[in-house]
Amino acid sequence: MPHVDLLLIGTGSGNSILSEEFRDRSVAIVERGVFGGTCLNVGCIPTKMFVHTADVAATPASSSRLGVDETLDQVRWPHIRDRIFGRIDPIASGGRDYRTTHPDNAHVTLYEGTARFTAERQVQIEPNDGGPSLSLTADQVVVAAGGRPYIPNIPGLADVPFHTSDTIMRLEELPRHLTVVGGGYVATELAHVFSSLGVAVTVINRSGALLRAEDEEVSARFTELADLKWDVRLNTTVRRVDQHGSALRLELAGPEGETTLETGELLLAVGRVPNTDLLDAPAGGLAMNPAGLLVVDEYQRTTVDGVWALGDICSPWALKHVANHEARIVQHNVLHPESPQAADHRYVPHAVFSSPQVASVGMTEKHALAQGIEISVARQAYADIAYGWAMEDTTGFAKLVAEKGTGRLLGAHIIGPQAPTLIQPLIQAMSFEQDVREIARGQYWIHPAMPELVENALLQLD
Ligand SMILES: Cc1cc2nc3c(=O)[nH]c(=O)nc-3n(C[C@H](O)[C@H](O)[C@H](O)COP(=O)(O)OP(=O)(O)OC[C@H]3O[C@@H](n4cnc5c(N)ncnc54)[C@H](O)[C@@H]3O)c2cc1C
Ligand SMILES: NC(=O)c1ccc[n+]([C@@H]2O[C@H](COP(=O)([O-])OP(=O)(O)OC[C@H]3O[C@@H](n4cnc5c(N)ncnc54)[C@H](O)[C@@H]3O)[C@@H](O)[C@H]2O)c1
């Protein structure tokens, strides 16, 4: 049975581990899908390329309030789709070619197939081309096998065509109507994309608010604004789906009782599941938590000696910046076992690139109160800063949660233009434990730029 120094499962964030310091080690990589993983091929990168395009397409709809009357003449979907994937696909194949043919990677073998544990640090690989399976052992294993869309158990689903985030971005043509099931990141980002490109969108959400995990005021504002653009059905579930001519017919149960809805395309965006089942983690001795994530300690060590994990296979955040951070930790710890580093998960921020945009770090007001912390809460509207006047923004705001007395920032939540960019100084403040008074007063804030939103929010804290 072949043996390698290092076995890497998954080429998303895991692929970045192989620096030149690994050149004297034999390495095997196993990848069952497209080289480069979720973020590059079907996740962050294409979605944000579509989101930017959608933002541009949506501009005419909001420009008349500034006295500029614009119209959207045409959306050329095949051009947009092919422009985006015409950039991404060569990066994925280039990454694969680099690992398989470049002399830098003479010590690396890429196996294209599915790895499944058969013992500790031992896998069986089922090649994608149907060839004979192969077993492999390794001194060290890095599991970076990510996750995939969760497919809910809806009667009739197996007999109809439906989409997940893996497929919807490659549609042949735009439908007249799209139904999105879910109310989280993927649902709200892709609803924005398709509605801005001219598709009528219905969002079906099981709970009573979109982006329900956000601070309550942010989630409520987002839901209120979404309702103005999309047909939002809250507290509603899909009971059944059937093909009806060229359309799909959904049977819904919601506040109005049982209703039906006809739609051109169906997008399921109801969360993701880790790929631990495909790996047969228990056969490798790897412990999982109740959510199916691999159990790791602060050094990203699994429960088996010499086996490490990173990213969506073990991380409750399922965010690319977290996977990247964990990849750097694993890289260091595999190379320098004598001085291991711990991952820093203290203040993990996130952003939702919908319309409006949302960004958040740390505790919501509700979480802080639940912990019995005495808090000061500040709210600053975009409408009350100079750049907000320039944009005629009437709905965005920043909300800060700080500990009373100490000046310690506990959480920051922004909804509105450029929220993911505006929040960065607050992430920095929390990570470096800066006093909010010092950040507000101890530096210049460019006038009249958008970060005055953050400055003014900080100045309001008690
Ligand atoms: C639509 C969408 C948009 C997103 N947008 C953002 C965003 O804006 N910002 C952000 O921070 N995050 C975003 N994310 C999340 C982000 O993409 C993931 O957190 C990140 O890509 C996870 O990286 P990973 O390396 O853990 O896993 P992946 O990139 O999923 O890599 C895992 C790889 O392992 C392979 N694999 C799995 N099982 C096996 C096996 N048994 N054998 C061999 N290979 C296997 C898979 O084929 C895959 O290529 C988005 C996700 C989606 C779906
Ligand atoms: N901007 C970003 O960083 C970004 C963008 C997209 C995805 N992601 C990552 O990918 C993950 C997956 O995104 P997502 O939007 O699929 O998940 P999510 O967890 O954000 O949202 C899932 C939604 O589906 C609903 N839901 C769950 N089970 C359901 C069921 N059985 N029936 C009906 N509704 C159900 C939930 O109430 C929620 O509204 C995210 O958690 C995030 O980590 C990140």
Image: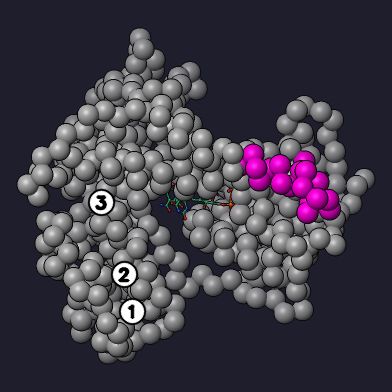
Q: Quadrant of the N terminus?
A: top right
117 vs 335: above or below: above
Measured as percent of width and height from the top left, residue 54 is found at 31, 40
**Numbered badge on residue 142:** none
Secondary structure of the magenta portion, mostly?
helix
Q: In this view of the protein, which residue sits in the foreground, 106 or 295?
A: 106
Residue appearing at x 15%, y 44% in the figure: 62
Kindly tell me whether residue 237 is visible in this rendering.
no
The question of residue 373 being in magenta is answered with no
Residue appearing at x 59%, y 43% in the figure: 91
Q: What's the amino acid at mark 3?
A: Pro
Q: What's the amino acid at mark 1?
A: Leu
Q: Is mark 2 within 8 Å of ligand 2?
A: no
| Kind of element beneath mark 1 | strand
Q: Residues within 10 Å of mark 2 (few under 14, many from 20)?
A: many
In this figure, what is the number of numbered marks? 3
458 vs 119: above or below: below
Q: In this view of the protein, which residue sits in the foreground, 449 or 151?
A: 449
Q: How is the image coloured?
A: one colour
Label 1 – label 3 distance at C-alpha? 24 Å
| Kind of element beneath mark 2 | strand
Instruction: Check the image and name the residue furthest to the top.
Output: 245
Measured as percent of width and height from the top left, residue 326 is found at 60, 64
250 vs 393: above or below: above
The residue that label 3 is drawn on is 356
Q: Residues within 10 Å of mark 3 (few under 14, many from 20)?
A: many
**For this view, does 15 lie left or right of residue 393?**
right
The residue that label 1 is drawn on is 409
Q: Is mark 1 within 8 Å of ligand 2?
A: no
